[in-house]
Amino acid sequence: MKRASIIAKHGKPDLGKVAREVTDWLRTHGYSVTVDSVVKEFCTECELVKREDLAARHPNFVVVLGGDGTLLAAARNVAEAGIPILGVNLGSLGFLTEIKQGEIAQALADVDAGRYELSLRSMIHCQVQRKGTCVASYDALNDIVMNQRAVARITEFEVRVNGTFVSNYMADGLIVATPTGSTAYSLAAGGPILAPDVPGFVITPVATHALTNRPLVVQDTALIEIRIIVTREQAYLTIDGQQGFPLEEGDIVQCRKSEFNVKLFRLPPRTFFEVLRNKLKWGER
């Protein structure tokens, strides 16, 4: 039997209407449907599955109803199992959730018929080393960020790539972003946009206190090590803007390419550059 799962962001406009449209289409076309607690409100006959247990049900694909944040959370749950994701945009910007509400039925039909491409998005794996012991580890699709909880407080970071000293950064924060994450916080902090298939990571300082410090692109085969030298307030490591871990002076955050990829449906003829033009309003006056 064909299987599909649906997860959603609570409180999104038209969520009930869209959730019922997706579940009705899937059930009509022979899919066994599992849903999270948000979608369960609108599809009482669908089977409820916790998000963390979703991959164990082995769906053919997952439909995400919401914005990029909802998709990021789903990606961390299903990346290891290699389950592809179809993102329906109910948010504002939506670089990852590309499908518009009026395109849902056609998108589901294309996926069901195999008329699609899969965009493989690399993830970044990070570990926090404290006094020689790994005290935390995470995988992120967008980025890992180190900064302080207090406003307008700087931290000093020592950055090394493959063991070679790069620089000490005095900044409000430091971002290590994947190509997918290059259009998120890193972009807002002045970093470059990387196409999804570029094998690299972006190291972007946030509000650096040296005018010559600039974002740096390195190969995704590199080991990036960031040591917290001085922090005047509580510093945090943030994963995809959703998970956090407190950092201490002397901690070393090691970043390398994850062994997992996230699979996103790309339905032709839409391309990454078309998405950029539409989302960033390029060429408009």
Image: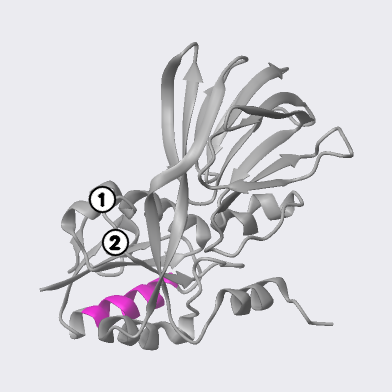
Q: Position of residue 175 (x, y in %)?
A: 64, 41
Question: Few, some or many C-alpha atoms within 10 Å of disc 1 (few <14, some 14-19, many ≥20)?
Answer: few
Which residues are the magenta region? Answer: 15-26
CA separation, marks 1 and 2? 16 Å
Q: Quadrant of the N terminus?
A: bottom left
Q: Main secondary structure of the magenta part?
A: helix
For residue 83, the mark is 2
Residue at 57% x, 32% y: name it.
162
Q: Is residue 205 visible?
A: yes
Can residue 23 be found in the magenta stretch? yes
The type of residue carrying mark 1 is: Lys
Q: Residue at x 74, y 46 (%)?
A: 215
Residue toward you, 271 or 222: 222
| Amino acid type, label 2 | Ile
The magenta stretch spans residue 116: no
- Above or below residue 82? Residue 220 is above
At mark 2, the secondary structure is loop
